[in-house]
Image: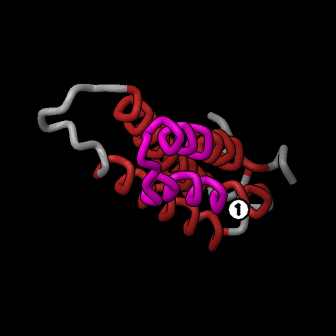
Amino acid sequence: MLHPYIINSINATILIVAGLAVYFIQPVRPLLALVAPGLGIMLLACTYHLRKHNRFVTHTVTALTLLAAIIVIMRLNAAGETWDTTHILLFVMGVSCLVAVGVFIGTFMRERRLRNNTIYKDDL
């Protein structure tokens, strides 16, 4: 299993790149499309503290990633529309955030079961 800071970096990069692509694909360029890249930049800024195993930052990043997943998935008006590039990119961002949250929670549970911090011995 990859470490949370690696997953966070990958997820933040996906949010930034795909979010900017969604922004520039649309001819109107709404400011709402910049929410995902903004959250990606905030998550990327927390990567250093995730690597140092700051628990407060880890829990904050998990909550922000879940919030990003909810925001991105709520923007998917797939009720009757065709799936174009914008919808596919939003779906990819949502799945990326949900996978990241799953990895974060899985790492928390695994670390809690071991109780000796051996998961992160190679980072310290």
Q: Which residue is mark 1?
A: 46
Q: Which residue is located at x 84 percent, y 48 percent?
A: 123
Taking 71 as reference, is 1 above or below it?
Answer: above
Magenta region includes residue 19: yes
Taking 48 as reference, is 100 above or below it?
Answer: above
Q: Residues within 10 Å of mark 1 (few under 14, many from 20)?
A: many
Q: Which residue is located at x 40 percent, y 51 percent?
A: 69
Q: Which amino acid type is shown beneath numbered disc 1?
A: Cys
Using the image as rendered, state which of residue 33 and residue 58 is in the foreground.
Answer: 33
Q: Is residue 47 left or right of residue 37?
A: right
Using the image as rendered, state which of residue 28 and residue 11 is in the foreground.
Answer: 28
Using the image as rendered, state which of residue 101 and residue 91 is in the foreground.
Answer: 91
Residue that sits furthest to the left in the current view = 80
Residue that sits furthest to the bottom in the current view = 56
Q: Which residue is located at x 41 percent, y 42 percent?
A: 94
Residue 119 place in picture, x, y as percent: 71, 46
- Disc 1 is placed on an element classified as loop
Q: Is residue 22 left or right of residue 123?
A: left
Number of numbered labels in the structure image:
1
Residue 26 place in picture, x, y as percent: 43, 40
Magenta region includes residue 122: no
Segment tinted magenta in the rendering: 15-43
Residue 114 place in picture, x, y as percent: 61, 52
Taking 111 as reference, is 63 above or below it?
Answer: below
Using the image as rendered, state which of residue 8 and residue 42 is in the foreground.
Answer: 42
Main SS class of the magenta portion in the image: helix
Q: Point out the image quarter for the N terminus.
A: top right
Q: Point out the image quarter for the C terminus.
A: bottom right
Q: Quadrant of residue 43?
A: bottom right
Residue that sits furthest to the right in the current view = 124
Residue that sits furthest to the front in the current view = 27
Residue 25 place in picture, x, y as percent: 48, 35
